Amino acid sequence: MKAGHPYELLPVAPPRSPRPLEQMRARIRYCDYSLSTERTCLYWTRQFIRFHRLRHPREMGGVEVAAFLTYLASTLKASVSTHRQALSALLFLYRQVLEVERPWMQEIGRPVARPAVPSMARRWNARQPLAACSIA
């Protein structure tokens, strides 16, 4: 038997998995991110897919991402850091895993954290109206 072209002997890479979570796991590991980052990204992607009744992310876009993030912020009362984490996971999904760049990705806003008020200032502000009401 005669040998063919040397490149014919090279192993062929397996086809990409159609499942977005498996694709995401492979991409995160390729980028050498930590295990906790992998778990977090997979968690938020899974929640996003479940929120939209198991639709494939390629079928969804900015409207669905905004609806999911609004649900997190308004219904679940998620913190700003949680909101940012979910948004980052979804942007990673669309940019790095599905390799999709859409205009809504640039337009979607990140939540702004409210400035923390020191607890002493809150106590003082709460006592101030009470002091004005006291009878002397």
Image (tube, rainbow, N blue to C red):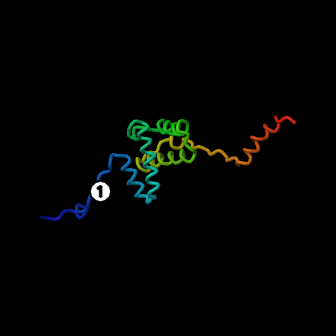
Q: Residues within 10 Å of mark 1 (few under 14, many from 20)?
A: few
Question: Who's the residue at 44% across and 52% down the image?
Answer: 39
Element type at marker 1?
A: loop
- Determine whether 7 is above or below 22 in the image: below
Q: State which quadrant residue 10 falls in.
A: bottom left
Question: Who's the residue at 41% across and 39% down the image?
Answer: 50
Quadrant for the C terminus, please: top right
- Determine whether 70 is above or below 92 in the image: above
Q: Give the left or right position of residue 132, taking residue 68 as reference.
A: right
- Determine whether 29 is above or below 52 in the image: below
Foreground of the two, 21 or 31: 21
Question: Who's the residue at 70% across and 46% down the image?
Answer: 117
Residue 128 image offset from top left, x and y in percent: 79, 40
Foreground of the two, 53 or 87: 53
Residue found farthest to the left: 1
- Determine whether 61 is above or below 12 in the image: above
Question: Who's the residue at 50% across and 48% down the image?
Answer: 88
| Number of disc labels | 1
Q: Mark 1 points at which residue?
A: 13
Q: Give the left or right position of residue 112, taking residue 118 as reference.
A: left
Residue 42 image offset from top left, x and y in percent: 42, 49
Residue 106 image offset from top left, x and y in percent: 53, 44
Q: Give the left or right position of residue 6, taking residue 26 as reference.
A: left
Foreground of the two, 75 or 57: 75
